[in-house]
């Protein structure tokens, strides 16, 4: 607690700061960014005739931006410590299972928000256990298939835009689509005659309690599975994808924002209200052409998106906001996704992309699962940040299967 100093030379010491104080500083910097944005957007000063004032405003903008970037970097820590824990885990799993398993690490110095580092631990442990148990074959089976006797699990981290990407790969047997499909039919998750592509079949492993393990072990078959992994990652505003090839292995790719304090969002308008859609969840947006939106009896409004019918949610009606656009061709459709599920959000207008400082919601919004937080916009308005995962997973008012091919 408080401040501790170590090291002797000037410029070489390390200052330890209480995380509460650090978070308070970052919040204050966020308030400064908002205030600066409000000043710049004020019509009385945003187009000054005084060139000196114009230069001063430019300097203020630059200094504020640098301060925000520096303050946010204080939250960033390398992922190295988490990766090193996985090294010990793999050694233990190899001994426990009698397999030769090696772990290869890439990007250990990749930095991300310290909160994310802590939250990533459990999902990574579960996926590495999955790779060791389900993926990597015994040495005899590997050599019979012409593979090295030792199996390899690769952990990789890197930055991509404003996000951190973490990949967990193994060179094992890969996922078995036929077994996954059979288990899903047995559990009633899908019908036997459902026509699913391989990607959709792989997504079934994220169903609650789903497992193809034939026997319960210390590592698998206990019904606490990948659904928990996905739920934890979605809490961090991230997403997880699967790529697998029979006999060659499986790769799980996790994408998350670098920090939980700032979010890049698509700012949309519905009536007089402003909402923020996290860009990580946005697949595309467009103004519908005549005939693209239709009402199917017993199914509600749907939009034909690239040949597939996707349920449409009128954001204004859903959030009790009076929308200006009623005719679909006069508004905008924002296609959002969570896992393999999609919804079309119908809004009045797109205002643009914006980075905002996230503010938590008060007790008044405790039961409002549609919102993940709030932000003060540059014009002083409050914008509500939409929880896309919640919106996508809400059951439509009628039984409609997402992704049915349009006739």
Image (cartoon, helix red, strand yellow):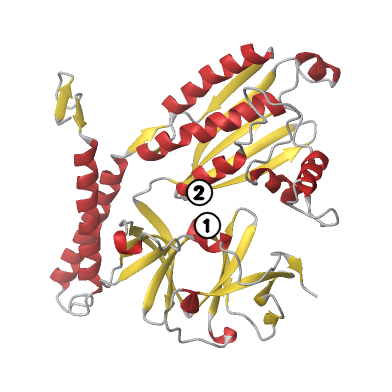
Residue at screen point 49% across, 31% down? 107
Q: Quadrant of the N terminus?
A: top left
Number of on-image labels: 2
The answer to which of 217 and 174 lies nearer the viewer is 217
Q: Which image quarter is the C terminus in?
A: bottom right
The quarter of the picture where residue 313 lies is bottom right
Q: Position of residue 385 (x, y in %)?
A: 40, 63
Few, some or many residues within 10 Å of mark 2 (<14, 14–19, 20+):
some
Does 199 appear above or below 210? Answer: below
Q: Measuring 20% from the left and 24% from the top, which residue is drawn there?
A: 12
Please provide percent x and percent y for residue 235: 46, 48
Of 381 and 65, the residue lying toward us: 381
Q: In this view, does 52 lie to the left or right of 217?
A: left
Residue drawn where x is 63% and y is 25% of the image? 219
Q: Alpha carbon of mark 1 to alpha carbon of mark 2: how far? A: 7 Å
Inspect this view and state whether residue 171 appears: no
Displayed quadrant of residue 352: bottom left
Question: Callout 1 environment at 10 Å: few (<14), some (14 to 19), or many (20+)?
Answer: many
Q: Contact, CB < 8 Å: mark 1 with mark 2? A: yes
Q: Where is residue 281 in the image (x, y as percent from the top left)?
A: 53, 58
- The quarter holding residue 393 reads bottom right
Is any part of residue 274 visible from this angle? Answer: yes
Which circle marks residue 234 in the picture? 2
Q: Which mark is residue 266?
A: none
Secondary structure state at the residue bearing disc 1: helix
**Residue 342 location in percent, x, y?**
62, 62
> Along the polypeptide, which appears first: circle 1 or circle 2?
2
**Residue at left offset 76%, top offset 53%:** 190
Name the residue that disc number 1 marks. Answer: 389
Q: Is mark 2 on a helix, strand or loop?
A: helix
Front residue of this view, candidates 42 and 142: 142
């Amino acid at each position: 607690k408080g401040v501790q100093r170590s090291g002797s030379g000037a410029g070489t010491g390390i200052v330890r700061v209480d995380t509460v104080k650090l978070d308070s500083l970052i919040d204050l910097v966020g308030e400064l960014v908002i205030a600066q944005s409000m000043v710049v957007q004020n019509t009385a000063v945003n187009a000054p005739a005084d060139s000196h004032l114009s230069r001063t405003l430019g300097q203020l903008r630059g200094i504020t931006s640098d301060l925000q970037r520096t303050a946010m970097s204080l939250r960033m820590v390398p992922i190295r410590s988490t990766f090193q824990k996985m090294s010990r885990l793999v050694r233990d799993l190899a001994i426990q299972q009698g397999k030769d398993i090696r772990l290869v690490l890439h990007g250990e110095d990749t930095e991300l928000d310290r909160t994310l580092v802590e939250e990533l631990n459990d999902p990574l442990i579960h996926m590495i256990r999955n790779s060791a148990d389900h993926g990597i074959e015994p040495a005899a089976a590997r050599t019979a298939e012409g593979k090295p006797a030792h199996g390899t699990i690769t952990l990789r981290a890197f930055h991509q835009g404003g996000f951190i990407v973490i990949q967990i790969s193994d060179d094992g047997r890969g996922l078995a689509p036929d077994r996954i499909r059979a288990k899903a039919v047995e559990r009633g998750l899908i019908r036997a005659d459902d026509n699913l592509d391989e990607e959709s079949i792989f997504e079934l492993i994220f169903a609650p309690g789903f497992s193809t393990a034939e026997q319960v072990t210390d590592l698998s078959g206990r019904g606490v599975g990948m659904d928990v992994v996905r739920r934890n990652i979605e809490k961090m505003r991230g997403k997880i994808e699967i790529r697998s090839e029979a006999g060659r292995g499986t790769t799980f790719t996790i994408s998350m924002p670098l920090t939980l304090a700032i979010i890049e969002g698509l700012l949309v308008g519905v009536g007089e209200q402003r909402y923020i859609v996290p860009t990580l969840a946005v697949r595309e947006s467009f103004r519908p052409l005549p005939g693209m939106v239709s009402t199917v009896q017993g199914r509600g409004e749907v939009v034909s998106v690239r040949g597939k019918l996707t349920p449409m949610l009128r954001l204004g009606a859903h959030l009790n906001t009076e929308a200006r656009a009623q005719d679909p061709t006069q508004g905008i459709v924002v296609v959002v996704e969570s896992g393999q599920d999609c919804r079309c959000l119908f809004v009045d207008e797109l205002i643009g992309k914006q980075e905002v400082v996230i503010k938590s919601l008060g007790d008044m919004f405790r039961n409002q699962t549609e919102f993940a937080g709030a932000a003060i916009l540059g014009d002083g308005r409050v914008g509500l940040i939409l929880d896309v995962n919640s919106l996508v997973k809400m059951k439509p008012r009628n039984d409609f299967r997402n992704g049915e091919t349009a006739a």
